[in-house]
Every structure is written in C-alpha cells, then in structure tokens.
Amino acid sequence: MADHPLRPARDRRLGEPLPHQLANLTQAHQIAKGL
C-alpha cells in the first residue's frame, strides 16, 4: 500500500520539473540573444 501513494507522488514530482526546466531554457535563450 505504501508503494501505491508513492508512485503517483513520484510521477507528479517528475512532471513538475519538466515544465520548469523548459521555462528556464527559454529564458536562457532570450537572455543569450539579448547579450
């Protein structure tokens, strides 16, 4: 039973940093273009 609640929590945690990293990459690209 402990594995069940941990599985969705892990999936959600992995899905969160994905969009965050994409936003960081976009910002880095814009900053590099401005420089």
Image: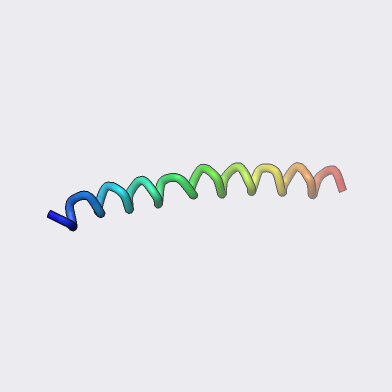
Residue in the picture at 71% in, 48% down? 28
The front one of 23 and 16 is 16
Left or right of 14, for residue 6:
left
- The colour style of the image is rainbow
Q: Name the residue at 87% across, 48% down.
A: 35
Taking the image as shown, residue 31 lies to the left or right of residue 14, namely: right
Q: Is residue 20 above or below residue 1?
A: above
Residue 33's spot in the image, x, y percent? 81, 45
Percent coordinates x, y for residue 8 in the rendering: 27, 47
Which residue is at 25% across, 54% downward?
6
Q: Could you tell whether 23 is left or right of 1 in the image?
A: right
User: Residue 27 appears in which quarter of the rendering?
Assistant: top right
Location of residue 20 by image quarter: top right
Q: Position of residue 23 (x, y in %)?
A: 60, 42
Task: Report whether 14 appears left or right of 35.
Answer: left
| Tally of numbered tags | 0
Quadrant into which the N terminus falls: bottom left
Q: Residue at 72% x, 46% y: name it.
A: 29
- Residue lying at the far right of the rendered structure: 35
